[in-house]
Amino acid sequence: METLLLIAILMPLAGAIAMGRDEQSARWLSLAVTLAVLLCACVLAAAFPIEGPQATKPFAAVRIPWPDASIHPDRPPQSLPPHLALDGLSLWLFALTALLMVVCVAISWRAIDQQVPLYHRLLLILETGMLGVFAAQDVILFYVFFEFTLVPLFFIIGIWGSEQRRWAAIKFFLYTLAGSVLTLLALLAVVLWDYFHGASGRLNFSIPLLAENLQQHPIDPQWQVLIFLGLFAGFAIKVPLFPLHTWLPLAHVQAPAAGSVLLAGVLLKIGTYGFVRFCLPMLPEATTKAMPWMLWLSLAGIIYGALVALAQSDFKRLIAYSSISHMGFCMLGIFALNRLGLQGAVLQMVNHGLSTGGLFAVVGMIYERYHTRHIADLAGLARRTPILAFFAVVLALSSIGLPGLNGFVGELLVLVGMFQRGWAEAPQPYAAQYRVIAVGATLGVVLAAWYMLWMVQQVFFGPLREPKPQHAEHDAAVRDLNVREILALAPLAVVIVWIGLWPQFFLARIAPTLDPYLNPYENISKNVFRAIPDRQHAKHTEQPAEHRQLDLRDCPDSTAALTRQTGAGAIPPVHSSNLQQTD
Amino acid sequence: MFDIALLLPLIPALPLAAAIVIGALGPWLLRDRSHVPAVAAIGISCLLSLLLLWSVHQEISGSARQRPAALAYTQHESGGSAADHGVGDDPAGNRNSAGATAVGFERIVRLWTWAAVEKAGLAHTELTAPEPANAGHLGADASTVHTPTARPAFKIEIALRADPLTAVMLATVTLVSLVVAVYSIGYMHGDRGYWRFFAYISLFVFSMTMLVSASNFILLYVFWEAVGLCSYLLIGFWYQKPEAAAAGKKAFIVNRVGDFGFALGVFLLWTTYGTLDFHDGAVPGILGQTRLSGAAPFVGGATATAICLLLMLGACGKSAQFPLHVWLPDAMEGPTPVSALIHAATMVTAGVYMVARCTPLYLASVEAQQIVAVIGGATALMAAIIAITQTDLKRILAYSTISQLGYMFLALGAGTLAGVTAGMFHLFTHAFFKALLFLGAGSVMHAMGGVIDIRCFSGLRRIMPVTHWTFLVGCLGLAGVFPLAGFWSKDPILVALHDQASTSSAGSLYYWLYIAGMLGAALTAFYTFRAFWLTFYGPLRTPPEAGHHAHESPPSMTGPLVLLAVATLGVGAAFGPTRLFEQFLLDTPSLEYARALAEQAAAGTGAHVGNDAHGAHTAVALLSQAVVLAGIALSAMMYLGRQIDPEKLAAALDRAKLYTLSYRKMYWDEIYQATVVWPAWIAAQISAALDRLVIDGLVDLCGLAPKLLGAALRPLQNGLVQYYALAMVIGLLLLLGALLW
């Protein structure tokens, strides 16, 4: 399994290097590679343990030789924790990436006819980056892959995009880069805090180890807030959270279809993924403090995104703003900080990737046929292209959360989680706010039906209206989807129905990883500012077995230190002098 | 005799299989034979539903369970009963219905776990039950049940239930569906989307049967939306017509508003009860044996009222009640069999079913009950007034459906057991006569070449005798003329209101609702027969679209008409006066709880419900017959004998704008346009402008800042060596100055 994970991540890179100059062979090579990666991802998902002690451990862990630094050089070198692995949080996002990549190669087959090998090369490099982000169990690797995804997408938008592609590419690149620089600082601050205050005294980059250590030696609250803000800068832009979203519609509109699919389907998830991966376990106090703010911003995004979507006349802009609305649901679920909300949010990330990614693919197919993105130019396409209309309606219904399809499950869990937070688990001064947020978010579901059905009705139903063909070769009647295009969309539809009918299959693999993330928030309803639980409680009952074992085995001294501290029962004082060094 | 656990899942499974088969094979293999799988599947489902009905009946009577007169309400053995009924682990879900304290008859069939989030809820002790409803009666001791346990899971199973209420609904739905499916063979013949139609119909039957057999609120909600989807697809079936596509969208969105309320209600149920199951599981179900036997309380007070009203909002959307009724008349753009099946007989009654199912919740909130009744009464009257002046035959019937659904809610809101059973009985009979009327209208439309405006044709009895006679039966049934179906079901509603008016604390409210019901009955008779006279009497006129040989419809269409006419003639008298329907329904757990409560209340006050009021009931029946006949007579005078000129009357009424008010449907569409659609649209435009100008403007401004800084500093580097030299000298001087200072 370890080899398989490594192969899945590195194969696209190898494919990109090996790619020749011939256009047709470039397409086939690209398809073969992405299919192989998808196969790997499927095998990994199938082998993923559901229950038992294995379920909470990182799966298919790969260890990479890594320099080991220590403030105690006399200690024996550490056996290194995994640097690449999958767990419940990343498994389905990993698989989603692999799936959407195949779709992207398929829909680019004819749509991209210039510099084809370069295009596929960039696409494959991008795949390595995206898979790497989700598999990284290490701060440095995570950040490298995180930035690594920007470059190929920058070129994809900038070279193969529409009329304003340069402007869109630059804005996308600079906006996200500006945020992620601060994220880097924040991540380094976390690592250095652990280095100076942690029991191991080592330079730890491993995310699970950091999470474990920081629960025992929590970061100073003021620093938590600063670090949270740094992480927020990068991740919230990536999500994008209102009001940091304006790069998204532009990038979506200008990007080629595959670029939009990947942007909406995978890259936005990195933001929400980052919040879950870093903020929740490492910065519990800051997260608790930020909770009402984040919830309000999420709600604003849900309502505002839906309203703006209602006013759009351009397909891609409409779907882009619907993305903002849907990602608001993900954020809402995460910062509901309970099991229902968090599991729903993680599932909703996958759902959004499937439905919105699929919708962008459909729009790309329409664009390929009519060369227009204006909703008003088209009507009654169900007559001319019934299969296309079928997929569009399925994807739209999935996007508006129709029961029986995937979107419903995620939204349901998120909303129930939020209601749970508002009615049953709210700390007193916040109860009214949280209830307003819960009800407002439910209202967003109504708006979603409005704009989505408006678009579907305009474009696919009513009397047939098509723009005049611009070129003579397009004069022939527009054809319906061919086999390639059907095969590109069918897997999405199958997974959409699968998640809709049997979400437990997916949730069962998500839950064991996520549950420990919520330990610091168990008592949040009791007192909002005392979020960190009693350390003994946390230590003895709820920690994932793997982390503890690593800790004990690798750092014999830390056990002693820990017992000393728990025996003393006091939180070690924060040395501000040490903090200075982290700057 | 027949295993319920096998029958129950098969009933929805068969239509689903048919929908898949037609969807996969329809366009290229089945084509004109697409109806075969659909009709076969629905037919077998119908048979199985009747078998299920019979099995449930056998189980109830065969087990010889005597209904415990005073259940466990007074001296509750709550601990014991909670343990007995905590049978959530029983995989088959078979419960011995003859158990000593079992409330009603129910059987749960669990299929698979849809989603489960462990430890999601609050521990039992934290589940708030500060205001137990009916505390005086039930007096449940919370401490015995509310022992601290582990946090309950948010566990949603695909669980179906069989009880009398479900069995009756299943039989009604599948029976009407079968008739309509057979009718559609003739009606939809030659349509381009023939296979699509039958695929959708099968999908609808699947969804609707699942809806009525679901045993938790999530599943109920899922299929609540699924039938809405089928409705959307079928209203927009002829999607090339812009009106059809717009009507479909409107139906879906208005329903979404209702579903918004429903969803909020469900979420509140979760936060209040910590489960969403009807039946008992690890946690006492919301409508489970533990609660119904009085061992655990229902939450009362403001929470109960909020839950009930939110659920009612959902019911308003689905059952087209005021103020969410606006979608149903537009839904008539769909094919007529769809109007008959979905928008008259089955789907729109889902709201009634849901409220009836949740009777115990409504019993916990008197306010909610009264609001349900007021909404029902207002809708019944308002829709009847609008129906008087409409000229589209199908829309008249649509408003009539809204009005009749209003009657059902009026009955449910009466808050008595008699009201609930009367409402359900009206649902049952209404399904037959309204489907009959719609199919009759479809037959007319078929012959008239798609024209359905009653001003464009008349005297059709000469060329369409079968349609004429069956339509007459339907009209009599709808108007509630003795001894047809409508009489037997509408009369108990009025009786229930009349009883409430004399016994309830809110007597005057129910008295006014009773009067509204009477008035509505007169109006119903009037508009029904107005449409009838105008369509079938007078000189023979046909629109040009009908061609020269307008003729009676084929047997595949008249057959179902005759069958439904026979049902309309028979079902009322068969089940009404014999009280078979009512007695059977009473074994539903929710209703048996209501009965026990009512008996307890009666025992408390020493009154006896029902018998001494017999004289008053006869008077109600006679009065209703009188107003109905008056309505029919008035319509005959206006449209048959022309003793009164309708034009003049309309003009006279219009002096107070009354005619226009009715003709323009009380301006509801305009009101919504002005209060919801335009404000939302304007908010959307403002947000979009805000997004473009302000938020993105700020971002671009930030992006511009380095550029501006560069532009400001650029003149410094101008390439003139003298300039640099000057700068160096100035810098040197400054440095020297600073050092010497």
Image (tube, helix red, strand yellow):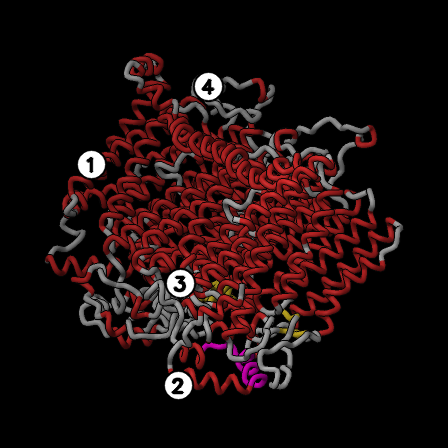
**Of marks 1 and 2, the one in the foreground:** 2
User: Measuring 48% from the left and 55% from the top, which residue is drawn there?
Assistant: B210
The crowd level at tag 3 (other Cα within 10 Å; few <14, some 14-19, many 20+) is many
The crowd level at tag 1 (other Cα within 10 Å; few <14, some 14-19, many 20+) is some
- Give the Cα distance between marks 3 and 2: 46 Å
* Same chain assignment for discs 3 and 2: no
Magenta segment's dominant SS is helix
User: Measuring 73% from the left and 71% from the top, which residue is drawn there?
Assistant: A4
- Give the Cα distance between marks 3 and 4: 52 Å
Residue type beneath disc 3: Asp
To which residue does mark 3 refer?
Answer: B277
Residue type beneath disc 4: Arg
Q: Nearer the viewer, residue A501 or B336?
A: A501
* Same chain assignment for discs 3 and 4: yes
To which residue does mark 4 refer?
Answer: B455
Q: Does A551 appear in magenta?
A: yes
Q: How many marks are shown on the rendered structure?
A: 4
Q: Which residues are magenta?
A: A542-555
**Residue A220 visible somewhere in the drawing:** yes
Q: Are marks 1 and 2 in contact (CB under 8 Å)?
A: no
Mark seen at residue A567: 2
- Give the Cα distance between marks 1 and 3: 37 Å
Q: Position of residue A228 (x, y in %)?
A: 49, 59
